[in-house]
Amino acid sequence: MHILHDQPAELYSTFRLKTRLATVIEVNCLADLEKVDTCSSTPLVLGEGSNTVFLQAQTRSIVRFTGASITEKWLDDNCCLLHVEAGHNWHQLVTTTVERQLWGIENLALIPGSVGAAPVQNIGAYGVELADVCAYVDYFHWQTKSLQRLTTSECNFGYRDSVFKHHLTGKGIIVAVGINLTKIAKPVLSYQGLVNLPATSSIYEIYQKVIATRNSKLPDYRQLPNCGSFFKNPLISRADYQRLQRAYPTMPGYAQPDSQVKVPAAWLIDQQGFKGHQINDIACYPKQPLVLVNYGGGRAEDLLQLIAEIQAKVSSAYQISLEPEVRLLMRDGQQYV
Ligand SMILES: Cc1cc2nc3c(=O)[nH]c(=O)nc-3n(C[C@H](O)[C@H](O)[C@H](O)COP(=O)(O)OP(=O)(O)OC[C@H]3O[C@@H](n4cnc5c(N)ncnc54)[C@H](O)[C@@H]3O)c2cc1C
């Protein structure tokens, strides 16, 4: 166990707002997790901070699980189950699977962050989400100090959602994820950006195309701090969508299996003129206004003002409320809503 005191928050969040974290505890095995003090206050759990913004100082302990091993189990000649510890970097895992010609997560290349965070918001991109390949999630409960294996259905995956954001929030920490992969080619090319690839594309070609497309659209958080898409794409009823489309004929919408329609948040924000809109050092990225960026000296109050302006304008124009996809932490782990 590695305990660090009074840490600069910008080292632990890709949005890099400047504040302080009282205690960061890095743990790489179950035996050490059992020793983490959870009586005085429940710890906050952190991966690589690519979906977390520290708006204010944190006095609660922050725990990171850093174990990162991969264990492989072949279920038959073609199907392989990877048991991956939570501290493994997600993109490195995707790269390893592509090198080994194991299909399933190549469309999720270049998503920043850790394997342990992937089930929390059911990461997704280019027509694939973690739920499609997740076999189980191993979850350590703070209170009972016991490990529970959750099946995929127990994870209750939804769009950028899971049981870890609801019933299990704050109750424990993910220590490993089971991922089902296959040697049989399974290209998913239906999503915009990949549709022009031939159906015979190799796993490597798809992986490269995803990386090239993402690099052309999204800023590199190491050069321009950001947390990717800042808001979730809102889901609205079909009736509301039809009503809005009469007023805004170019409004895109994607029908969902549950008869709701997903509207791209980027379109709503763009239409309201936010591309490049800036409040001091916080701005909507000029190429993609759904991504909020920190030009270096970003302050929490500027970020909160920009969020409020975007939400107010989108709500007044379309009666749609935009919900942050990013975890915004006020003092002592209180979530900003
Ligand atoms: C440039 C950029 C592009 C992005 N693109 C995408 C994208 O295409 N699709 C997408 O879905 N996301 C995307 N994201 C968001 C982000 O990459 C994912 O949410 C990722 O899973 C976050 O991983 P992390 O380790 O950084 O999580 P953190 O920010 O550290 O944590 C995120 C949440 O997960 C919880 N958590 C982290 N680790 C654990 C654990 N071991 N046990 C329990 N809970 C845990 C935290 O408590 C928190 O609630 C993008 C981000 C950036 C910066």
Image (tube, rainbow, N blue to C red):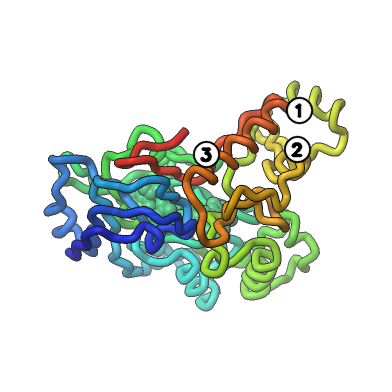
Q: Quick one: SS at disc 3?
A: loop
- The image quadrant of residue 188 is bottom right
Q: How far is the residue under mark 1 from the one under mark 2?
A: 8 Å
Q: Callout 2: few (<14), some (14-19), or many (20+) C-alpha neighbours within 10 Å?
A: some
Identify the residue position indicated by label 1 in the image: 241
Q: Earlier in the sequence, mark 1 or mark 3?
A: 3
Q: Callout 1: few (<14), some (14-19), or many (20+) C-alpha neighbours within 10 Å?
A: many
Q: Callout 3: few (<14), some (14-19), or many (20+) C-alpha neighbours within 10 Å?
A: few
Q: Which mark is residue 253?
A: 2
Whether pointer 1 and pointer 2 mark residues with C-beta atoms closer than 8 Å, the reply is yes
**Comparing marks 1 and 3, which lies closer to the viewer?**
1
**Comparing marks 2 and 3, which lies closer to the viewer?**
2
Q: Quick one: SS at disc 1?
A: helix
Task: Give the answer, above or below, for where 219 lies relative to 132.
Answer: below
Residue 144 in the image, given as x and y percentages of width and height: 16, 41
Whether pointer 1 and pointer 3 mark residues with C-beta atoms closer than 8 Å, the reply is no
Q: Earlier in the sequence, mark 2 or mark 3?
A: 3
Ligand 1 is within 8 Å of the C-beta of the residue at disc 1:
no
- The image quadrant of residue 26 is bottom left
**Kind of residue at badge 1:** Tyr
In this rendering, would 106 be left or right of 20? right
| Quadrant in which the N terminus appears | bottom left
Q: How far is the residue under mark 2 from the one under mark 3?
A: 18 Å
Kindly identify the residue that appears in the image at 29 percent across and 60 percent down.
Answer: 7
Q: Nearer the viewer, residue 211 or 12?
A: 12
Ligand 1 is within 8 Å of the C-beta of the residue at disc 3:
no
Q: How far is the residue under mark 1 from the one under mark 3?
A: 21 Å
Residue 109 in the image, given as x and y percentages of width and height: 57, 65
Identify the residue position indicated by label 3 in the image: 158
